[in-house]
Amino acid sequence: MSYAVSVKNLHVSYYGNEAVRNVSFTIEKKNLVGIIGPNGAGKSTLLKSLLGLIPKDKGEVQLLGKNIQEVRKQIAYVPQRSNIDWDFPITVIDTVLLGTYPALGLLRRPRKKEKEWAYECLKKVGMESFSKRQIGELSGGQQQRVFIARALAQKAEMFFLDEPFVGIDVTSEEMIVTLLKELRDKGKTVLVVHHDLSKATSYFNELILINKELVGCGAVEEIFRPELMTKAYKSQFPMFQEIGVSV
Ligand code: ADP
Ligand code: MG
């Protein structure tokens, strides 16, 4: 059986500065995984590098036992909200329809079947009554729900999300977490970059803890322990060194 994610000795740098150093881990399928670590720890860099969106210096990455190029259609990615141009003129339903394009191929236009499916996905995030609205008119939480609907429309095997809960309301956050747990329970693999430690144990069943290097990867109970958390966070919060982290 192949792993959902397999990473060996991964190094990634920007202009000669290492952001991810010698990271190795494996993730099995059917897991909801939090990628945690302090600011600037390389969480987004790791995610983008797994997706082949930025070049790696060295190392091997396999998704679903294959190179990213071979499985791209099976991977849905929800980038950080701050990296999206919200002034781009596109309606909610068309944003979700974009999720059906990988399966359609570039030259085919979506038809009734795809439009109905996109609408179904909007319903799953409670946004069907907004289908004709411009994406830029929505609140942060509503925009994020539309992006989750687009990811669902893709019928992917794996879902990668970067800080999906930043700048959104509590109702949207709870709805998204519930959906991600459902996807996991159906056998999908979900990786989420996340910085709010207070929710880490209730949202995820596995954690990848990094601070440039890998500090730990495994079940939440194994990773969310004072020794490992202190190791990862001490550079950001020196007081952790003396008192340890209460978990
Ligand atoms: P995190 O997501 O954990 O906050 P990042 O992966 O965004 O961390 O960044 C890791 C390190 O790489 C940081 O020191 C950051 O300043 C640097 N970095 C990130 N993106 C770029 C970029 N496009 N160009 C140069 N340096 C970058
Ligand atoms: Mg980040």
Image: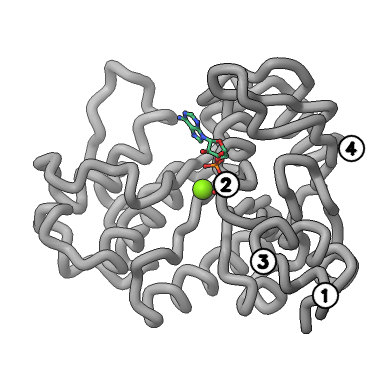
Q: Earlier in the sequence, mark 3 or mark 1?
A: 3
Q: Residues at badges 4 and 1 in contact (C-beta under 8 Å)?
A: no
- Using the rendered image of the protein, determine whether residue 186 is visible from the camera's viewpoint: no
Q: Amino acid at mark 2?
A: Gly
Looking at the rendered structure, which numbered label has been put on residue 40? 2
Q: How many marks?
A: 4
Which corner quadrant of the image does residue 178 belong to?
bottom right
Q: Is residue 33 above or below residue 8?
A: below
Secondary element under disc 4, as helix, strand or loop, is loop
The C terminus is located in which quarter?
A: bottom right
Q: Amino acid at mark 3?
A: Phe
Q: Amino acid at mark 1?
A: Glu
Q: Which residue is mark 3?
A: 237
Residue toward you, 61 or 115: 61
Q: Is residue 69 left or right of residue 240?
A: left
> Residue at point 22% right, 41% down?
85
The N terminus is located in which quarter?
A: top right
Indicate the position of residue 42 as horizontal and vertical percent values. 62, 42
